[in-house]
Amino acid sequence: MTNRIIAALMSVTGVWAIAACAGSTTLEEEVDVSVNEEKSVEIQKVVEKWDCPGCNPNERYVLSKLQDYTKITDRNALSTLMGNIKSESNFHPNICEGGARVAYHQCHSGGYGLIQWTTVGRYNALGNFCRKYSCDPSSLEGQTRFLVNEVHFQKVLPEFEGTGWSIRQYMAPAYYWLGWGIKGYRETFAHEYYAKMVKVTTPLTEG
């Protein structure tokens, strides 16, 4: 074969020759893709949440669960919810209207619990929810679960899950949620929570 013919063949097949080399098992075997398990670092997902280091355990629990059970991320929205709960019960789940600290079935008049469930329908709904889902209607855990699932809260939840409103603006859906008679210090409490909240990064737990 003449040199001219060899050169022509090389010009036509050159691309294929390069591609074949790139995919050869010889090159693949030279690449070390093994993992040193002793030095490897587990990749862990994290999530940002608002916390209140200066708050008491009940306040911190409710703040955490409001974020776990909903899509609320706005600091003003969370502060508004916290301020209203403080105004209703000071975060005491076993409190009957008037101040008596009793179990759920021992509160016979007025409001009861975190948000002072007052009407017969709402009071009974708390008990029915905990019977169905095996929780204690007198407990912080049981009431927090019911709070975020109650139809009255679910109706206004989309407004709290938005962002950009002021605390005063969030007070409107808070009113429709609770139907308070006297506003009192709700807004002041909300601003106090706003000042104490900090954003923290925590590992994302499975399940």
Image: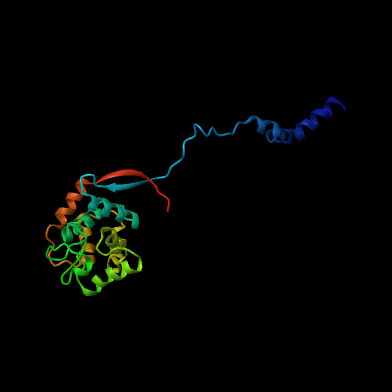
Q: Residue at x 24, y 65 (%)?
A: 177
Q: Residue at x 28, y 69 (%)?
A: 127
Q: Residue furthest right?
A: 1
**Residue 96 image offset from top left, x and y in percent:** 16, 65
Q: In terms of image quadrants, where is residue 200? A: top left
**145 shown above or below 6:** below
Q: Residue at x 32, y 63 (%)?
A: 135
**Quarter of the image with the N terminus in it:** top right
**Quarter of the image with the C terminus in it:** bottom left
**Residue 67 image offset from top left, x and y in percent:** 32, 54
**Residue 178 image offset from top left, x and y in percent:** 21, 66
| Left or right of 192 on screen, residue 155 | right
- Does residue 70 show up? no
The count of marks equals 0
| Left or right of 120 on screen, residue 7 | right
- Does residue 160 show up? yes
Instruction: Indicate the colouring scheme.
Output: rainbow
Q: In terms of image quadrants, where is residue 69? A: bottom left
Q: Residue furthest bottom?
A: 120
**Residue 173 image offset from top left, x and y in percent:** 24, 63
Which of 18/80 is in front? Answer: 80
Which of 132/190 is in front? Answer: 132
